[in-house]
């Protein structure tokens, strides 16, 4: 069902790297862990109504570049119009509120839309405040779970 080049999550560095086997070859991951890491870790394009972290919206002055709304060039190829990645990056300047926690869960669930198509079950997502400006996010698909951190500035 799943067959990807495996990623290893370094939770302290909040980064991923490719897994290399003892023989020097890439490790193959047949679990949903790697697709979950990619879905949560990539930045999805901001929707027209989304407020960007610098405070701009679609009604303000036009962004100076296409990059400000982020997203993947591959999004243009999805016939269903679904964006790869998550909109979690939009929360980087949010405050420690219940709304921020709920948006974290919503954006993570939104990014894991593929789980139901591939496994028949929606992804399970839970977010909680771990530290003053740090959210923990646990995502589970088909019995495989990952836990990542999301920093907010305020």
Image (cartoon, helix red, strand yellow):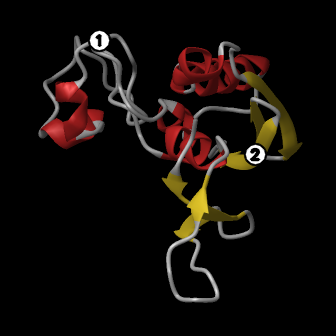
Instruction: Give SS at disc 1.
Output: loop
Q: Which mark is residue 80?
A: 1
How many numbered marks, from 0 up? 2
Residue farthest bottom in this picture: 23
Residue visible at 31% across and 25% down in the picture: 56
Q: Which of the image's four quarters has the C terminus?
A: top right
Q: CA distance from mark 1 to mark 2?
A: 27 Å
Q: Position of residue 121 (x, y in %)?
A: 70, 14
Residue visible at 61% across and 81% down in the picture: 21
Disc 2: which residue: 146
Q: Which mark is residue 148?
A: none
> In the rendered image of this protein, does residue 148 appear above or below residue 6?
above
> In the rendered image of this protein, does residue 34 appear above or below residue 138?
below
Instruction: Classify mark 1: residues with Cα within 10 Å, few (<14), some (14-19) or many (20+).
Output: few
Query: In the rendered image, which quarter is residue 27 located in?
Result: bottom right
Between 72 and 104, which is closer to the camera in this rendering?
Answer: 72
Q: Position of residue 82 (x, y in %)?
A: 35, 18
Between 68 and 96, which is closer to the camera in this rendering?
Answer: 68
Q: Is residue 84 left or right of residue 24?
A: left
Instruction: Give SS at disc 2.
Output: strand
Query: In the rendered image, which quarter is residue 109 located in?
Result: top right
Residue visible at 58% across and 89% down in the picture: 23
Between 96 and 85, which is closer to the camera in this rendering?
Answer: 85
> In the rendered image of this protein, does residue 13 appear above or below residue 124?
below
């Amino acid at each position: 069902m799943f067959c990807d080049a495996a990623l290893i999550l370094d939770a302290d560095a909040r980064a991923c790297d490719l897994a290399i086997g003892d023989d020097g070859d890439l490790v193959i991951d047949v679990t949903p862990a790697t697709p979950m890491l990619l879905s949560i870790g990539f930045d999805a394009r901001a929707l027209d109504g989304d407020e960007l972290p610098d405070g701009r919206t679609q009604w303000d002055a036009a962004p100076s570049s296409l990059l400000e709304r982020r997203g993947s060039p591959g999004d243009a190829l999805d016939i269903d119009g679904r964006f790869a990645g998550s909109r979690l990056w939009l929360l980087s300047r949010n405050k420690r509120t219940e709304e921020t926690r709920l948006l974290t869960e919503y954006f993570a669930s939104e990014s894991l839309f593929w789980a139901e198509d591939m496994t028949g079950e929606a992804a399970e997502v839970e977010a909680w405040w771990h530290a003053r400006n740090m959210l923990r996010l646990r995502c589970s698909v088909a019995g495989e779970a990952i836990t990542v951190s999301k920093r907010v500035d305020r």
